Image (cartoon, helix red, strand yellow):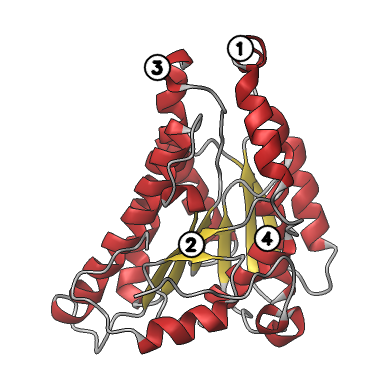
């Protein structure tokens, strides 16, 4: 069977038009990690524009407070800024507690904090390599561990993990990043399958009301791309930079609004049928849904496919 072709999307398009989601998230509380800048910041703004009360968090206080202030400048918006290190368990517990106390139960969790370093594996430092895994795998799974029980009691909630198409490709010079994105994508798929069983068979609900997704946001030029080439790579492996620059020139100019409003689309309950899967924001989501709906669903699904 040939691989289906879906329409390429680089910015806002009909299915994720902001006007469609005005008030759609009213009464919902959203927590977005890594939201002081970049993609996370845009996701937080989109959620707030759709009516959600939003918790902004990151490690840099100035960025967190600046983004929170920007969100609060929107008409009728509710938001707080909480400085926290996602790699610190006590910070995660404090974060969840503060958001719940000040805004209410967390209904939407978007684990967006991430990092990357372009470097051949043989040149990497072990601690730095595992630090990337901790930020992009351990941190989101532990935050899920903290927040999920209340979602299970209510049988409602949406969790989105910022992943990457790197979960499906053997992209060189990014071993830690690729492993991390594959891991978190697989985690979302496995946990979705577990919840589909547990919420009905163990907790007695008619069906599972908790939806998990991972997303590929698109090759968006953020500050992460500027900081991903350490001096060691520049000095000892300039071929890495040359290759990545050539690769980046082949990418369309993806807008940061694309993943932001795709997250709103999913958080608003429009992703039925895509639960547990890696959602590629650069492909028309309605076309993907239509294809998935028309394809027999295997007993054990593949989140990375």
Lower sequence index among marks 1 and 2: 2
Lower sequence index among marks 2 and 3: 3
Using the image, determine if residue 38 lies above or below residue 19.
Answer: above
The residue carrying mark 4 is: 44
Report, in whole angstroms, how far the alpha carbon at label 2 lies from the one at label 3.
28 Å
Q: Which mark is residue 232?
A: 1
Lower sequence index among marks 2 and 4: 4
Which residue is at 47% across, 87% downward?
290
Which residue is at 44% across, 40% downward?
178
Of the 4 image quadrants, the one containing the C terminus is bottom left
Mark toward the viewer: 1 or 3 = 1
Which residue is at 70% across, 87% downward?
20
Mark toward the viewer: 2 or 4 = 2
Which residue is at 59% across, 16% downward?
237
**Residues under numbered marks 2 and 4 in contact, where contact means CB atoms less than 8 Å apart:** no
Give the structural element (helix, strand or loop) at label 4: helix
Front in this rendered view, residue 207 or 15 = 15
Decide if residue 56 is on the left or right side of residue 200. Answer: right
Mark toward the viewer: 3 or 4 = 3
**Residues under numbered marks 1 and 2 in contact, where contact means CB atoms less than 8 Å apart:** no
The residue carrying mark 3 is: 126
Give how far across and how far down residue 149 sits, in percent.
Answer: 31, 63
The residue carrying mark 2 is: 160
Report, in whole angstroms, how far the alpha carbon at label 2 lies from the one at label 4.
13 Å
Furthest residue in direction left, as rendered: 201
Give how far across and how far down residue 95 sits, in percent.
Answer: 52, 47
């Amino acid at each position: 069977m040939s691989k289906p072709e879906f329409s390429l999307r680089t910015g806002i398009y009909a299915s994720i038009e902001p006007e469609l989601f005005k008030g759609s998230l009213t009464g919902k509380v959203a927590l977005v990690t890594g939201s002081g800048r970049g993609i996370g910041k845009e996701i937080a703004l989109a959620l707030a524009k759709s009516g959600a009360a939003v918790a902004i968090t990151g490690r840099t206080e100035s960025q967190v407070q600046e983004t929170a202030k920007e969100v609060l400048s929107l008409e009728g918006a509710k938001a707080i800024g909480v400085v926290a290190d996602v790699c610190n368990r006590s910070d995660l517990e404090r974060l969840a507690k503060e958001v719940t106390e000040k805004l209410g139960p967390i209904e939407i969790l978007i684990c967006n904090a991430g990092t990357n370093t372009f470097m051949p594996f043989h040149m990497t430092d072990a601690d730095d390599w595992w630090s990337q895994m901790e930020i992009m795998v351990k941190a989101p799974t532990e935050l899920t561990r903290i927040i999920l029980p209340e979602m299970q009691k209510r049988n409602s909630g949406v969790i989105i993990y910022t992943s990457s198409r790197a979960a499906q490709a053997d992209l060189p010079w990014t071993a830690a990043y690729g492993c991390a994105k594959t891991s978190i994508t697989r985690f979302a798929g496995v946990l979705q399958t577990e919840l589909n069983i547990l919420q009905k068979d163990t907790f007695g609900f008619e069906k599972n009301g908790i939806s998990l997704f991972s997303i590929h946001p698109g090759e968006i030029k953020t500050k992460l791309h500027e900081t991903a080439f350490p001096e060691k790579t520049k000095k000892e492996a300039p071929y890495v930079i040359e290759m990545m620059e050539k690769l980046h020139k082949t990418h369309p100019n993806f807008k940061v609004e694309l993943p932001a409003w795709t997250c709103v689309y999913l958080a608003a309950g429009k992703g039925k049928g895509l639960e547990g899967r890696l959602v590629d924001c650069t492909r028309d989501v309605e076309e993907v849904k239509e294809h998935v709906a028309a394809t027999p669903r295997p007993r054990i699904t593949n989140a990375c496919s």
